Amino acid sequence: QVQLVESGGGLVQAGGSLRLSCTASELILASDAMGWYRQVPGKPREVVATLITGYPPYLSDFAEGRFTIFRDNDKNAVYLQMNRLKIEDTGVYYCWVRFRRHGGSEYWGQGTQVTVSS
């Protein structure tokens, strides 16, 4: 079974930064899709950012200009750099990977809590 292990969440003051990391238990290829989703209080789970082959990196409107998604295939990892965090960014952040192999199977991390305080 493929496992995605997330780290980097925590408590940060508004205006601060966090870097989330997600490492897969098996090889990540350039053709595999990766991304981050989040669930904030009162809202359904939503996409934050994705890296999908054939497309430019995608950032949600709330993330544009503040967040950056990048990957390191040699480390089987994807990262989310979050800057100028806002209180409304508080929520659980989930790593997502869709493998080209495994029949295009999708996998999710268990989530990491991000709490932004004033």
Image (cartoon, rainbow, N blue to C red):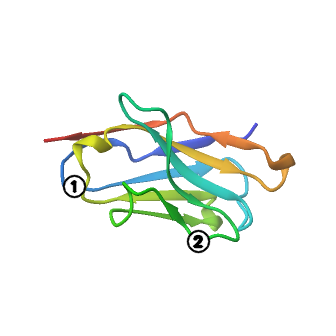
Q: Residue 45 in the image: state x and y as whole percent.
A: 50, 36
> Splitting the image into 4 quarters, where does residue 64 fall?
bottom left
Q: Name the residue that disc number 2 marks.
A: 56
Q: Residue 42 in the image: state x and y as whole percent.
A: 37, 28
Q: Is residue 52 left or right of residue 5?
A: right
Q: Which numbered marker is on residue 16?
A: 1
Q: Amino acid at mark 2?
A: Pro
Residue under the image location 51 percent in, 45 percent down: 37
Residue at the farthest left position: 118
Q: Is residue 70 above or below residue 6?
A: below
Which quadrant of the figure contains the N terminus?
Answer: top right
Residue under the image location 23 percent in, 42 percent down: 87
Which SS class for mark 1?
loop
Dot placed on the residue nearer the N-terminal end, 2 or 1: 1
Q: Residue 52 in the image: state x and y as whole percent.
A: 65, 63
Mark 2–mark 1 Cα distance, whole angstroms, equals 27 Å
Which quadrant of the figure contains the C terminus?
Answer: top left
Q: Amino acid at mark 1?
A: Gly
Q: Is residue 116 above or below residue 52?
A: above
Between 19 and 45, the one lying in front of the other is 45
Circle 2 packing at 10 Å, graded few (<14), some (14-19), many (20+), is few
